[in-house]
Image (cartoon, rainbow, N blue to C red):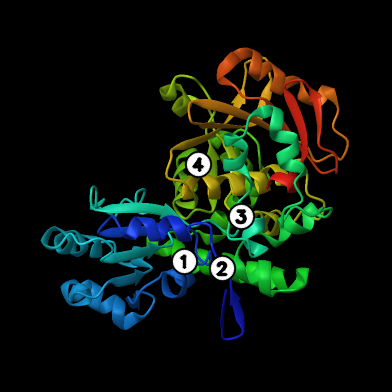
Amino acid sequence: MTIIHGVEILPRLVGTALAERLKVMPAVVVTGPRQSGKSTLAEHLVPGGRRYASLDDLDVLHLARTEPEALLAGREPVTLDEVQREPQLLRAVKRAIDRDRRPGRYLLTGSANLLLMRQVSESLAGRASYLTLWPMTRREQLGLGRCGLWDELLATPEEQWRELLLDTAAGTKPVDDWPAIAARGGFPTPALQLQTPAERAIWFDGYVRTYLERDLQALAAISALPDFRRLMRAACLRLGQLLNQTELGRDTGLAQPTVHRWLNLLETSYLLVRLPGYAVNRTKRLIKAPKLYWGDTGVASHLGGDDKPAGAVLENLVLCDLLAWRDARLERAELAYWRTATGEEVDFVVEAGGRLLPIEVKAGARPRLADAVHLRSFRAEYGRKARAGLLLHTGQAVDWLAPDVLAVPWWRLV
């Protein structure tokens, strides 16, 4: 690890994936929410000498708008931070790559999903690899530079799962206070540097204000900031629920088209996560109503203002780890939820390697067989394609509730 200005720079999950992609592609684009650690990753954790420039610097921003070729000139690899501030810069990057396709020439970072931004006309298709840096996972905060044991679990026969998860490896010590972990979130400053809830509340308030008054305005011109903030809070109070835009608009006094547009902006900024419903037919997944979550439980807890978080917050904490895992791996994986017309529901379905892993999250310390009913229904529906179900809980025991459902403390896996 490296110490810079007295602050410990911890390894990040995407570090290895980023280094691998820089060896292959002319450009690598790292996006994610503001303050998730992209600048630190790009400036301090990327191996090799690179010229660094941030578009947060007004002089650099002016150069990007008026003479982008000058900003990209030279044979030295270049790191450009916060490129969403001048989306047209990607045109110049595309031209430069077409002239010289050496791998690793450009590392671009942005606090918005460039693939979803309307202003971005250049996708750099065939020229760039994309990575997402989510807020820090629990194991990243512990200095392990990784997410939960999802890869190990998927690679292990089910009859060996219990032994795998009982392993006393680093990072699996008992965790009792999950609400405190959720309230802290994964942004490096509140998660690692601030010590009290009051300090973190000040930081989160400043974060939301900066997003509303600066970052949001770079994506779209919105004058009704109090209305937008009210929508953010209403969305935080609906964690884990099916998204009904008409109902959300009615509760906040906003027109449905406005709700739709503003939710898209929150998703583009990586603050909002819409989890699709699982269906064998992938087209039908786009039709099913998504479930609503947030990219960071700390922001959601701050905006929601709930001192006693419900189980949906623990669900969101698990989902944040799954998102970090999914977006750092090379092999494709899908995340969804499962719900039937009769009300049977499984919180998460992981689709990877042609198999399905159903996961249910319960904010209780003593799981019962009744808690596994929907997991078993899912397995009955999808047969051999479905692996054994996981029931994550807040207790200590790792036990098979049924031959096809393993109850696991959430902290042993996440």
Which residue bears the numbered disc 4?
A: 255
Q: Is residue 338 above or below residue 248?
A: above
Image location of residue 193, percent across then percent down: 67, 74
**Which amino acid type is shown beneath numbered disc 2?**
Arg
**Which amino acid type is shown beneath numbered disc 1?**
Lys
- The residue drawn where x is 61% and y is 13% is 381
Q: Is residue 153 above or below residue 403?
A: below
Q: Which quarter of the rendering shows the N terminus?
A: bottom right
Between the C-alphas of marks 4 and 3, the distance is 27 Å
Image location of residue 111, percent across then percent down: 44, 62
Q: Nearer the viewer, mark 1 or mark 3?
A: 1
CB of mark 1 within 8 Å of CB of mark 3? no
Which residue bears the numbered disc 3?
A: 296
Q: Nearer the viewer, mark 1 or mark 4?
A: 1
Which residue bears the numbered disc 1?
A: 38
Dot 2 or dot 4, earlier in sequence: 2
Which residue bears the numbered disc 2?
A: 209
Q: Secondary structure at mark 4?
A: loop
- The residue drawn where x is 64% and y is 19% is 378
